[in-house]
Image: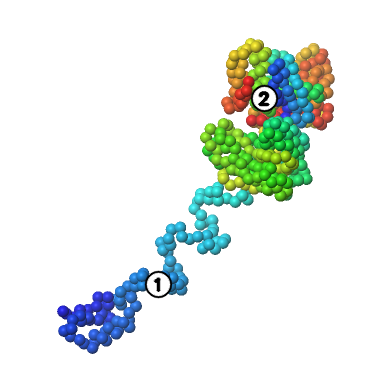
Amino acid sequence: MSVRPVAFNPDGSIETVFDEMGHSGTIPAADIQWSLNTDGSPNHSFIILNCPDGCGASSTHPVGGGAAPAEVQQMFVEKTRRDGCACGACQANDTSALPESHVRLNVNRMDGPGRWVEASA
Amino acid sequence: MARTNAVNYTGVNQFPRADAATDLFKKEDVQVLALAVDNHDHSSGKGLPLPAGAIPNGTITSAMIADGTIVAADIQDGAITSAKILDGTIATADHADASVTNAKLGTDTARLNLLTNGGFEIWQRGNGPFTAHTAYTADRWFILLGSGGSALSVSRDAANIPSGGRYAAALTHTLGGSAALYMQNAEVGKAAFSRTYSFSIMVLAAAANAIRPWIANGASGKVYGAYHTGNNTFQTLTASSAISGGFPGPNLDMGVELAASGTFYVSNAMLVMGSVAADYAPLHPADDLARCLRYYEGHFGTGYPTILGVATAASQNIGYGVGFAAQKAVVPTITKVGTWVATNCGQPSAGSASGSGYQLYVASSGAGQVQSQPNSPSNGVTAESNP
């Protein structure tokens, strides 16, 4: 598997597990980061999670969901609501439907229609 | 009245008949009549044809019928039963082309397995135990816990296996508020709509009514097969489903439901189209692995992958593109496993990925050569794609 979200907390932090290693723990909202392009700019299509166990593992999750579609897509929606999107299409603390729509658009762009499964955000 | 001739006798057998007392009586009349009687055999000119009612039921035997004279029209439609056909005599030419349907196949007719890793032979993530909800275990097989205290631990097992295999999955289950599932989400594409699928899996259980197979039935839920009888041997359990309208996507779920606490072993699963389940037919190992690589791929080993370059200053990103051995089903999650050797740079991470590869990069700490790579066989990169 991967360092993957399994539960979402009200403060924006997420509970994660890393199945192969049996690691688990909480990742604060501030540590849920966009990946960086080689020019240093953030990439709204990927989020990096470092294993909270400190083993050195880090997972780069695609907006399509990769290893865990429902949870990863929800993670993108919640980060976009909270922090805005790296591309500037959404502003921070946007409680409208725009963040979810934007993430859904990116999911469709990446993996095609039918990949969107997130429904709980 | 007048003398008349018999109408059912002709030629020398046609005797005259006097039907009035005044008719002339000749002794030749009796002689001809005697000849007619002597020649009487119901053939033409020798008496009336024999009516069906004149033959008692059940009196005509096979010996009375000339060989080779019964024609197809003499046999009532649908009257010949299996018991009338000698075993082993129906030849291929006796079957109309395209007339053998799926329902007529035996389970031992080898068919294409639509599952990935149906034999539970490939465990790229390790041997377990795996316990988390939605955790993948053997390639493509994952856990769905039930409610309220449900627990399931899955490990690779080499001791309790069906004949001919190497591994099974050992399932140690604690029943909670509802049953846990151990399942696969198989890519079957557009073919899923309005088709019938059959799932089979070999299961070992020591208790009856504790584990049973199931297969999704489109929007309406699951179709269950019979429970294992609990005789502590491997049994092949099956479930079939006609996919109904409203099926939500191109994937099909199937697996086993764990309805009681205990330890169970599963292996040799098959998913085939049609209403008849199939006995397990292994893939060639190369094909088995190739299917698994579509969903999970690991790049492990001391020194691979290696990021190597030269920076002219600090904070310069140096990247390295790595291709997959197999195209992924969807863009995968890339996980850098372990802490790598990093010279003049921080730890690498994957900046982006696609279905065909990923990019690793590091940020330089200063001017000079930059290098990072795994320094143990257990460190490396995994790519995981779960459609």
The amino acid marked with disc number 2 is Glu
> Is residue B66 something one can see in this rendering?
no
Q: Quadrant of residue B273?
A: top right
Count residues near mark 1 (Cα–Cα under 10 Å), then give few for <14, some for 14-19, many for 20+.
Answer: few
- Pinpoint residue A30: horizontal percent, then vertical percent: 73, 15
- Judged left or right of residue B62, residue B279 is right
Q: To which chain does the residue with label 1 belong?
A: B
Quadrant (top left, top right, bottom left, bottom right) of the C terminus of chain A: top right
**Which amino acid is tagged 1?**
Pro
Residue at horizontal 67 percent and vertical 35 percent from the top: B178
Q: Which residue is mark 2?
A: A71
* Residue B140, quarter of the rendered image: top right
The answer to whether marks 2 and 1 mark residues whose Cβ atoms lie closer than 8 Å is no
- Rendering coords of residue B377 (x, y %): 81, 31
* Number of numbered tags placed on the structure image: 2
Badge 1 element: loop
Q: Residue at 46%, 71% (x, y): give it.
A: B62
Q: Nearer the viewer, residue A113 or B4?
A: B4
Residue that carries the numbered disc 1 in the rendered image: B56
The percent coordinates of residue B3 (x first, y second) are 18, 80
Work out whether residue B282 or residue B55 is closer to the camera in this orientation and state it: B55
The image shows residue A13, relative to residue B150, as above or below, that is: above
Above or below residue B227? Residue B152 is: above
Tell me the chain of label 2: A
Residue A61, given in percent of the width and then of the height, sits at 69, 23
User: Under tag 2, what secondary structure?
Assistant: helix
Circle 2 crowding by C-alpha within 10 Å: few under 14, some 14–19, many from 20: many
